[in-house]
Amino acid sequence: MTFGDKVSHKTQELRGRMKRNAGEVTNNPRLQAEGRSEEMGGHLKQAVDKVKDAFGMGRRRPRRRTHRDTTYTGANADSNASSAASGSSCAQASRPTTPV
């Protein structure tokens, strides 16, 4: 999971804990229940994040390879490499020579 998601889930847990404590201090059962549920929601989301991290499910997939990422491996790859090494261009090396 992303760092932002982890921070958000921890924030939800802490917000719930604050509501629960405020409900206990003010003796407000509705606020206590709301805080407990929000706190448990944050705990649950953090547990799901840990499972996703353990199995690698939260990671982004690698970029797909395109034809631009691959090198040329055609039939003339070796001849083009050898002609480039000898100093002649590929176009000149592939022209047929005719006797004059």
Image: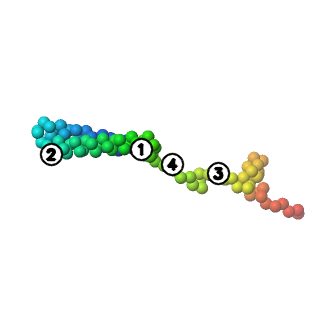
According to the image, label 4 marks what residue?
62
According to the image, label 3 marks what residue?
71
**Disc on the earlier residue, 2 or 4:** 2
Question: Of helix, strand and loop, which one carries label 4?
Answer: loop
According to the image, label 2 marks what residue?
30
* Circle 1: residue type: Lys
Question: Of helix, strand and loop, which one carries label 1?
Answer: helix
Closer-to-camera residue (20/98): 20
Locate residue 26 relative to residue 89 in the image: left or right.
left
Residue at horizontal 23 percent and vertical 45 percent from the top: 37
Residue 54, picture quadrant: top left
Q: Are marks 3 and 2 in contact (CB under 8 Å)?
A: no
The picture places residue 36, in percent across and down from the top left corner, at 22, 42
State the separation of the CA atoms marked 1 and 3: 35 Å
According to the image, label 1 marks what residue?
52
The picture places residue 49, in percent across and down from the top left corner, at 38, 43
Locate residue 92 relative to residue 38 in the image: left or right.
right
State the separation of the CA atoms marked 3 and 2: 66 Å
State the separation of the CA atoms marked 2 and 1: 33 Å
**Disc on the earlier residue, 4 or 3:** 4
